[in-house]
Image (cartoon, rainbow, N blue to C red):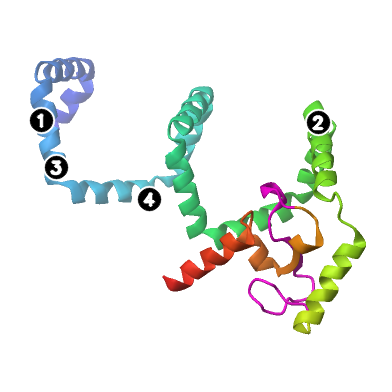
């Protein structure tokens, strides 16, 4: 009782004394704390987890306030860190997206459905900006270049010859029938790799194979599939 009363009436004196003591015995105090942390790792970890669970709302509010007060400094730091560790970030994000692909896709679809109107309106406004107009012109130019020389008769010929060869619309890569609406007009050598829209460079692929092939040539893709099957 006396000790408690003394502490309440001598708070400032006690604080000054403790501060001087820690300054005088700083190295000893640090060594003592380090020894304690090293010998009680599990207990400290459990205590922290329990405290976090009990004070989760308080922690969220503190983190939010700290971010709002230091937003510019944190953003600059994070941006610089990402630039300095770009290889690590690419590797980490690739692994993360591969591990949680279905979960992320589901979350993105749900977010899109909830915010669909807002995104459409934002895109309309963006297209009116100088940058948006420039991107629109570049996109139209790329589309015209992509479809240069591609005629209805060529496309029709590719589809008709595929059905004649296999009896039904079939993917030329996996040789499985292509479900209705899942067919892709595929470039054996991609346009980005110097391919053309000539009949001999076109074929029918299923959605799965076309996405997997991406910008590989037909030979590169078949070699990749062969190596995968061997392993």
Residue 36, x across and y down, in percent: 12, 39
Instruction: Tell me whether the residue at label 2 lies in contact with that at label 4, contact meaning CB atoms closer than 8 angstroms.
Output: no
Could you tell me how far apart the alpha carbons at marks 1 and 3 are, in whole angstroms? Answer: 11 Å
Disc nearer the start of the sequence (2/4): 4
Of helix, strand and loop, which one carries label 2?
helix
The mark lying in front, picked from 2 and 4, is 2
Disc nearer the start of the sequence (4/3): 3
The furthest residue to the front: 200
* Residue placed under numbered mark 3 in the picture: 38
Disc nearer the start of the sequence (1/2): 1
Instruction: Tell me whether the residue at label 4 lies in contact with that at label 1, contact meaning CB atoms closer than 8 angstroms.
Output: no
The mark lying in front, picked from 2 and 3, is 2
Q: Which numbered dot is residue 31?
A: 1
**Residue 159: in sight, yes or no?**
yes
Q: In the rendered structure, which segment of residues is drawn in magenta?
A: 169-195
Could you tell me how far apart the alpha carbons at marks 2 and 4 are, in whole angstroms? Answer: 51 Å
Could you tell me how far apart the alpha carbons at marks 1 and 2 are, in whole angstroms? Answer: 63 Å
Q: Which numbered dot is residue 53?
A: 4
The furthest residue to the bottom: 167
The mark lying in front, picked from 4 and 1, is 1
Magenta-span inclusion, residue 97: no
Of helix, strand and loop, which one carries label 1?
helix
**Residue 185: in sight, yes or no?**
no
Vertical placement of residue 173 versus 8, above or below: below
The mark lying in front, picked from 1 and 2, is 2
Could you tell me how far apart the alpha carbons at marks 4 and 3 are, in whole angstroms? Answer: 23 Å
Instruction: Tell me whether the residue at label 1 lies in contact with that at label 3, contact meaning CB atoms closer than 8 angstroms.
Output: no
Circle 1 Cα neighbour tier, 10 Å, few/some/many (<14 / 14–19 / ≥20) = few
At 81% from the left edge and 31% from the top edge, which residue is drawn? 134
Q: Which numbered dot is residue 134?
A: 2
């Amino acid at each position: 009782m006396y000790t408690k009363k003394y502490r309440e009436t001598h708070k400032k004196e006690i604080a000054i004394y403790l501060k001087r003591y820690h300054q005088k015995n700083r190295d000893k105090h640090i060594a003592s704390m380090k020894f304690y942390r090293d010998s009680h790792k599990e207990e400290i970890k459990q205590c922290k987890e329990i405290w976090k669970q009990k004070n989760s709302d308080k922690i969220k509010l503190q983190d939010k306030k700290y971010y709002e007060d230091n937003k510019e400094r944190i953003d600059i730091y994070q941006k610089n860190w990402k630039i300095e560790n770009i290889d690590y970030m690419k590797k980490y994000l690739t692994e993360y997206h591969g591990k949680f692909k279905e979960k992320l896709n589901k979350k993105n679809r749900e977010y899109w459905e909830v915010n669909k109107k807002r995104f459409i309106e934002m895109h309309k406004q963006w297209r009116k900006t100088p940058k948006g107009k420039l991107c629109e012109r570049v996109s139209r130019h790329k589309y015209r270049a992509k479809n240069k020389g591609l005629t209805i008769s060529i496309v029709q010929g590719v589809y008709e010859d595929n059905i004649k060869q296999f009896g039904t619309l079939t993917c030329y890569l996996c040789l499985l029938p292509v479900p209705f609406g899942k067919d892709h007009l595929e470039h054996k050598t991609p346009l980005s790799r110097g391919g053309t829209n000539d009949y001999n460079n076109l074929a029918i692929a299923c959605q799965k194979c076309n996405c997997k092939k991406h910008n590989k040539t037909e030979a590169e893709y078949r070699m990749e599939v062969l190596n995968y099957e061997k392993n």
